Image (tube, rainbow, N blue to C red):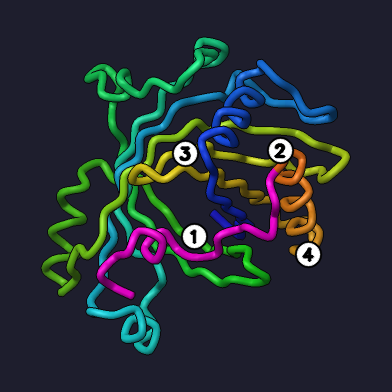
Amino acid sequence: MGREIELKIPLNDSQYEYIFSVITGKNNIPGFSFDNTLLCKIEKEDEYYSRYSTREESRKNGEPQVIRIRSEKEIFCGDKICADKINFSDAANPDVQKKSYFCIKRKVVENGIELNSENETFVENAAVIRDILELSGYIKFFEKQKNAISSYCNAPQLLKSVFHLELEIVNELKYIEVEVTDENEAAEIVRSALEKFVNAFGLNPSLKDSRSWMQILGAPVN
């Protein structure tokens, strides 16, 4: 995976419910077109690793900002998701297979928006990666759980590229994350389009949260 430009904003309950209603078609924003064939519920469990006890040490020694094992389930819903509330009970269904990925991410923040360079690969057995990391001196210092609705939106008046948004609950905190992965557009154009995109939902882009999840959730490595 190449360049990602991402923006995330914390939500209150009413903002969360309104965005859910737009994603599921109960409300609409003129010019915004959501692809419900790709609408899905996601359950993600992330484990973060480091060889250092502080983020300062990690940066000083050139360690990537993110070394992560992610295990996730995706349940493609289409129009079936159109309920009043998000129900993640079927994410625990044993018939839905969990997939795991190993990721190394290098992150830069410009004007409060994340620009990520991410390399990720599927792993058949996450336990093998855990063993390799532990044998190499890495420790698991942080975990997070995310329940989200993933959706894709076209808003050609803002940007030719597709917006990917996740309406999410992360360790009980409500957020929206929107990203664009197309590398053909200039970063400034994408950043401006992202701000206009969230503004269309009634959100103030100046409230974007540029902190990492580790900082937001108070991980031991600071």
Disc 4 marks which amino acid?
A: Glu
Q: How many marks?
A: 4
Start-end of magenta stretch: 203-222
Q: Pinpoint residue 26: horizontal percent, then vertical percent.
A: 66, 16
Q: Which residue is mark 3?
A: 168
| Residue 63 relative to residue 13: left or right | left
Give left or right: position of 40 versus 133.
Answer: right
- Lateral position of residue 183 relative to residue 135, left or right: right
Question: Mark 1 or mark 2: which is in front?
Answer: 2
Q: Residue at position x 34%, y 78% from top?
A: 55
Task: Assess whether mark 2 and mark 4 are in contact (beta carbons under 8 angstroms).
Answer: no
Residue at label 2? 201
The Cα–Cα distance between marks 4 and 2, rounded to whole angstroms, is 21 Å
Question: Which label is found at residue 118?
Answer: 1
Crowding at dot 3, Cα within 10 Å, few <14 / some 14-19 / many 20+, comes out as many
Disc number lying in front (4 or 1): 4
- Label 1 CA crowd tier, 10 Å (few <14, some 14–19, many 20+): some
The amino acid on which the numbered mark 2 sits, given as a three-letter code, is: Phe
Give residue 91's quadrant in the image. Answer: top left
Q: Are marks 1 and 2 in contact (CB under 8 Å)?
A: no
User: Residue 155: which quarter of the image?
Assistant: top right
Secondary structure mostly seen in magenta is: loop
Q: Amino acid at mark 3?
A: Glu
Q: Earlier in the sequence, mark 4 or mark 2?
A: 4
Which residue matches tag 4? 188
